[in-house]
Image (spheres, grey):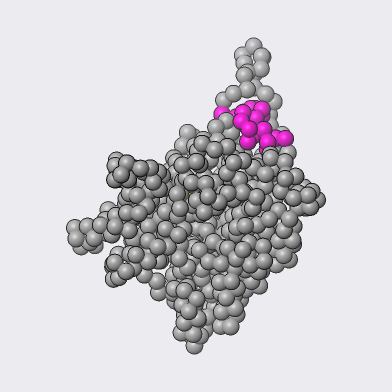
Amino acid sequence: MPPTSAPAGSAPAAPTDRVGKPRPRRGEGQWALGYREPLNKNEENKKNDDGLNVRQRIIDIYSKAGFDSIDPADLRGRFRWFGLYTQRAPGIDGGKTAVLEPEELDDRYFMLRIRIDGGQLSAAQLRTVAEISTAYGRDTADITDRQNVQLHWVRIEDVPTIWEKLEAVGLSTTEACGDTPRVILGCPLAGIADDEIVDATDQIHQIYDDHIGSPLFSNLPRKFKSSISGCSSYCTNHEINDVAFAGVVGPDGTPGFDLFVGGGLSTNPMFAKRLGTFVRPEQVSEVWAAVCSIFRDYGYRRLRHRARIKFLIKDWGAEKFREVLEKEYLGYALPDGPEPELQQGMRRDHVGVRRQRDGRNYVGFAPKVGRVSGTKLARVADIAEAHGSDRIRTTADQKLVILDIEDDQVDSIVAALEAEDLEVRPSVFRRQTMACTGIEFCKLAIVETKGRGASLVEELERRLPDFPEPITINLNGCPNSCARIQVADIGLKGQLVTNADGEQVEGYQVHLGGGLGLTAGFGRKVRGLKTTAEDLPDYVERVLRRFLETKEDGEAFAT
Ligand code: SF4
């Protein structure tokens, strides 16, 4: 399979017309078709210098000479290859987001994303993240819905020290952002769940070791999101990842994976296409590299908003993608395989106390909308260790799980967590409300999300204390979909709206009835369905009360 191991720069010669004259370098900018000239600023920056090279400049120059010494092409481009974004300067309202130049929105501080592949942390690793947060990030920390931890208020001067501390415990920020293979999602219960189809831990580690930080995959058309899981509740959402390996039992009765490609949300949401292949565990790394290589070589690079792999597979279809994968990249055919057996009403978040297959227990708990702090994460590490556990997990729903708790420790750990406002038996609203970073730190944001999400949870708990249905409520600060609004029961897309006095104020466009799993579908964006931020609790309460009043027996919100 030469294409996965060929240097990223070795594309075929430039295309020519029928009389041998070079064809204009246009098209979609697909390298495999010979279109190598950058067609936009981002492609030009990537061609000028590999994003991975910025690490040494941060260590040698920028951290010593300070923020003003940073080359703008590094600051707004290559820094992302190591999980660094400038955060939004405080006090700029959402109305300015689209009209100001990027440098006018930049703060002199950074958001730092720490990748946690498979969501797997030891107590020592979590404590290190916590210490970095308190020492260098003003005690900020968010658990993201891609199992990462994000810190804020990071100074460029501190980045090399932060990396040293992370790397000393086996963590990194390499390719946490940028046009790269981002963190690989994995089930937090991998290896311990009694209903697990297959443990994907080794596959996640192998891909991380073999391919993350490799120059072969450091210049992709855009980001590339992976999910590899054998969880029987499909908690890492294979439907909405660029590539996903979802656990199934194969034709010969052995466990393996069903392969999905091209899922993604944002402004053109698409569910991943099932290729219909069965991938054995030992083939996962090679198949992952082949899919990533197809994206690198054939992915569209002309327009950023069409540069995700979903647009390629939309044009090709699953059949052609599979043919290219097998014939051009793998050099062998994969067998046909079964599709995942999705179950009605299965929750994916792993919150609560449940039995592990070794007889011990896991304890999943819910911070409010993923917002924690360094201090709180240090407490979680302490609590885990005090109850005999060295394994903590992040989930794809902004939650945390502690593994390996003996029966006689369960009551004590539940009490200790709840004393930290980390609910093991949360209300439906705390359990299933997520919020993206929003205007507090994100330069693309139009509205506030984290604080508003937290107060919405509190209001709904007060107004609807015994609400019986599992309703997901997701808030985004802009039309991107970092908090997956299109697949929530109630998805709230931040935008400016007009209030009763005719003023432009923060508010949300409402999407209703989205979901994943058996009821997968994108929420309906009903014309005129908008609410101001101020009216949000009233609006959601009305929607939920009306649902309870009118629903038929067994009817879910999404139907
Ligand atoms: Fe920022 Fe928009 Fe993503 Fe929220 S959805 S984190 S506002 S880009």
Position above or below: 63 against 371: above
Residue 134 visible in the displayed image:
yes
Residue furthest to the top:
19
Position above or below: 400 against 45: below
- Percent of width and height locating residue 188: 52, 66
Position above or below: 144 against 52: below
Position above or below: 551 against 304: below
Could you tell me which residue is drawn at 61 percent across and 30 percent down? 40
Could you tell me which residue is drawn at 64 percent across and 11 percent down? 19
Residue toward you, 247 or 418: 418
Could you tell me which residue is drawn at 78 percent across and 49 percent down? 65
- Percent of width and height locating residue 410: 48, 83
- Percent of width and height locating residue 491: 37, 51
In the rendered view of the protein, which quadrant contains the N terminus? top right
Range drawn in magenta: 28-48
Residue 274 visible in the displayed image:
no
Horizontally, residue 357 falls left or right of residue 388, namely left
- Percent of width and height locating residue 149: 58, 61
Could you tell me which residue is drawn at 65 percent across and 30 percent down? 38
Residue toward you, 155 or 486: 155
Horizontally, residue 147 falls left or right of residue 530, namely right
Residue furthest to the right:
60
Q: Does the magenta stretch include residue 45?
A: yes
Residue toward you, 341 or 437: 437
